[in-house]
Image (cartoon, helix red, strand yellow):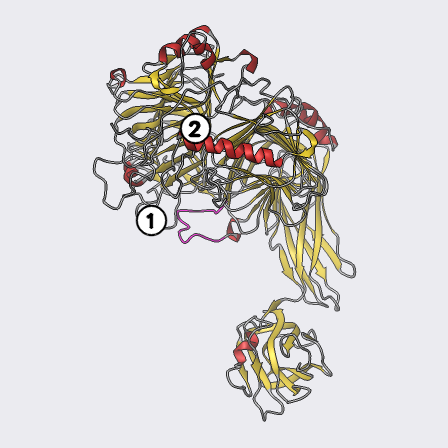
Amino acid sequence: MIESPPRRAVAARPAPGRTAVGLVAGLVLLAAAAVPATGPAASAASAASAASAASAASTSVYRTMPTDPTAVVLGSEQFPVHGDGIGDDTASLQAAIDEASRRGGRNWLGNIVGGARDVTVGDGGGVVFVPEGRYRLSRRVDLHASVRVIGFGATRPEFHLGEATPGFQEGTESFLFTAVRRPYQPGAARTFGNNDTFGTGLINLDIRIGAGNPAAVAVRFSGAQMFLLQDLDIHVGDGYAGIDHNANLIQRVKVHGGRFGMLAYAASPGWQTTVLDTTFEGQRDAAVKLHTDSKLSLIRNRIAHTPAGIVATPGQTQRLYVQDSVFEDIAGAAITLNDSDSVPATEEPELVRAQNQLNVVQTGVAGVGALLTTAPSGRTWAGPGPSYLVQDATLGLRVSDALGDGERRSDQVLVSATPAAPASFHRLLRSDIPLPPPSDDWVNLAEFAAARGVTVGSGTIDDQAIFQQAIDQHDTVYVPMGEYLIGDTLRLRPQSNLIGLHPRQTWLTLPDGHPAFADPDRPRPMIQTPPGGTNQVVGLSLDSARQTAGSVHVLWQSGAHSHLADIATQFVKWAPEETDPDDPGAGDPGYQYRGRHKYSFWVKGGGGTFANIWSVAGWADNGFLVEDTAVRGRLYEVSVEHHEHREVVLRRVRNWELHALQTEDHIYGWRSQAVELDDVHDVLFANTVFFRVATVLGPYPYAMGIRDSSGIVIRGTRGYRPTNVANTRWGATIADVATGRTVPELDVAYLAVGSANRQPAPAGLYVGLDEPRITVLPGRSGTAVLRVRNDGPGPVTGLAVRAEAPAGWQTRIRQDLEWLPNGQAATATIEVQVPAGAEQDGQIPLTVSYTRGGHRLEIPLTLQVRTGGDNLARDAAVTASSVLSTNVALNAVDGNRTGGRWISGSGDPSPTLTLDLGRRATLSRLALYSGVTGSGALRVRAFRVEVLIEGTWRPVGSVEQNIASPANVDLSGAPAGVEQVRVVFTEPSPTDGLARVFEVEVYGLR
């Protein structure tokens, strides 16, 4: 008999025989408490600091660890360590990680890409346990795909990079821990994790970077679903950054110091990252720096004691969502994003009305320069006082009363906030994720079964009876790694908890074709929780097998304080009975499977928190169904993919929040809509990605279809794709399936349906320059206009603007109002006088000060001043009196100062170059680059600059006895309105009479 492939695996090769799994203890996704704060640094922020100090740092959440031959234990006989912070433990740690990956490769549990894409082993990874201790590291440590490193003990273990360790002094990519793409295979190249790297984690550990390692980055964390950074303290010190890149879920992490706390990118392959219950403090430049299209959801985060909070890289788009967080003691702006018109524009502005999206909801701000600044314009929005609660702030397209008769759109920044005492902010950081039961109280399922003469977890016999007996007798059952056949529903009691360590190595599986799960009209779950329960189910994967059309992975009826997290299903991309001949074969993920299942995750009458879930059994009717509930529910970082008809369905639901929901239609699943809502009210979708891959076979008219629903708020979406428009983008973001009305824009910062009366009131102060950069020629003056708008509450008094000019410069300010009632605006004119000898551009720091509610407040801005103007000669029309060979005149205005040259012809004793600037201009200077590369011997010795005025060439400057390149000529005395410039070479060369010119630059203003 030929053994068929494992049901989760998609490789063509047969699975090897499995053996019984031993004992292991641990918890992968733990409940988060409020994030602690440090001491105050400013009077306005001190109360917030004290209020947010809710828990002790470095609390170990795994205190005990039973033995398990499946896991690897650092410090065991095979992997000896010093553990004293002095001896080098790098080699043993890397060997332990390699071994954990090898074990996952051999057992094929959780395999997705094994047998395909040049991976000949399973990729389900494994676990390395680290006892408490201090482990010195001296070089990069690679975390292979799906390997999780977990600390345990009364105190957390600490990995310490020794002071001034070689290799961590230069650059910005000296990583201490790095998530890599593939399972361990000797001799194979190691590349960074990407869109087919799943499940890697660092958990319950501390990382400390010693002094003298300025290039060090604690963790490079790039990959796709099920990635997890959890319960870490990262002390960066004078290193570069704590976290570089990001993937899926970062929870209860504290990053101290460093130049940056986190360098954020779009999680591979473009999804969001959710950061829960996390602190960034004491960074030298900024807490978070946003890079390429990062999509961050920051919930219950604290950012403190740093010059800047969250800062965007210039020229990049960002989608940022912040909720229930606190910014305190920040010298600059809490958030700095790019102006949407400063980033590359889409060719379809009607579908993407603004390039950036920002939402800030229920967030406290104290002792901060401003809430939001956009660059490079410098436009700034401050709150209504020194300490305030932001109820609603948005940047990007805002669609109010969507699908209704009063539908309206705005691209303006909105800030709605109220003054609030910093002491009140502690409530924002209270986590809604319950703490885990103490590990001392867990009952290990394998030990429980062995005491009764039963072996479980082999994947060969039905484990349901002994599993259910353990649940009936004990509140918390720990499930060691292995595969457990479940021939009937596991029914949890109200206080029951199921705890797993590693979802891709810990599987509950249905026997294929089991009659109890055959009837789709009578759906039957693998796991069922009771109404109102406080259940916690974490760290497991569920496989409903093939011929089980009535199966449901989970029926969840638990209450608001329950928790389902770190859960995955079998990996299946839906496909019809017949596939195209060129489709991926059996060795590539998914397409050989057939099945018709009822649901995957079914929440009926329940709620609670749901985090880091991957619902990817595409043959189910839908991947996440919620119905008949008003119990509060919160989703964090949930990925629902590959289903034929619907990804997420809500029916008769109230009071839910879905954060960082990601859906994906794939190839034959093109008929699937992302979200279906029926009789749904007061539900939030925050920072969603509705994705369609390039291979889908057809279009779909909308991502979200709704019927009889109200109070639906979407804060941030990504649904636009610029290529293959027929199939890979949605026809609209949302549609009312009864009326046919749609919102066609595919990237929306805020969209509200059925909430016409919930209009936020603007608050705070807006300050902005009409032009953030002006050009003033030396010896002349220029002006800039500053605008101030008071959005309330109440009047602004004592409005004043002051400027700090560079040495030798002069400024004068004229403003029209010092008192601004609510809703009124004022202007100030800043006149800048640049000295005649100025050669460098300058900056004018501006400070807008005002009084509101008895508090004197300030907003800083910067006016950029260019003193040389633009190079008007670049690509100008140019003619030469003569040319040597192919060294044409155009080479002198092509922008290349060291490349191709214009060379005058022999026999031309006084060659000329004539430039037509195209329009009249006021000139400031000319720079001429001449000679040959790397030599000063053949530079132009003397030349004269002339301008054409009323048909006559008039000299305006000259150079004699030149030995420089460039040679500069002051043209500030030239008449205004010049259109043509001529350079006359009176001594072209010291030797042969040829003028050799790399480039002519003429600076000025048109």
Q: Quadrant of the N terminus?
A: top left
Residue linked to disc 2: 504
- Element marked by disc 2: loop
Percent position of residue 171, x then y? 63, 50
Q: Is residue 1005 left or right of residue 496?
A: right
Rendering coords of residue 459 (x, y %): 36, 21
Look at mark 1 in the image and give the residue it sits on. 725
| 522 displayed left or right of 252 | left
Q: Secondary structure at mark 1?
A: loop
Please say whether residue 438 is visible from this viewpoint: no
Residue lying farthest front? 77
Residue 920, placed above or below residue 637: below
Sequence-wise, the earlier of marks 1 and 2 is 2
In magenta segment, residue 693: no
* In the displayed structure image, the side of residue 722 where residue 819 appears, left or right: right
Q: Quadrant of residue 15?
A: top left
- x and y, in percent, of residue 385 in the image: 67, 34
For the magenta stretch, what is the residue range? Answer: 344-361
Q: CA distance from mark 1 to mark 2?
A: 35 Å
Q: 10 Å neighbourhood of mark 2: few (<14), some, or many (≥20)? A: many
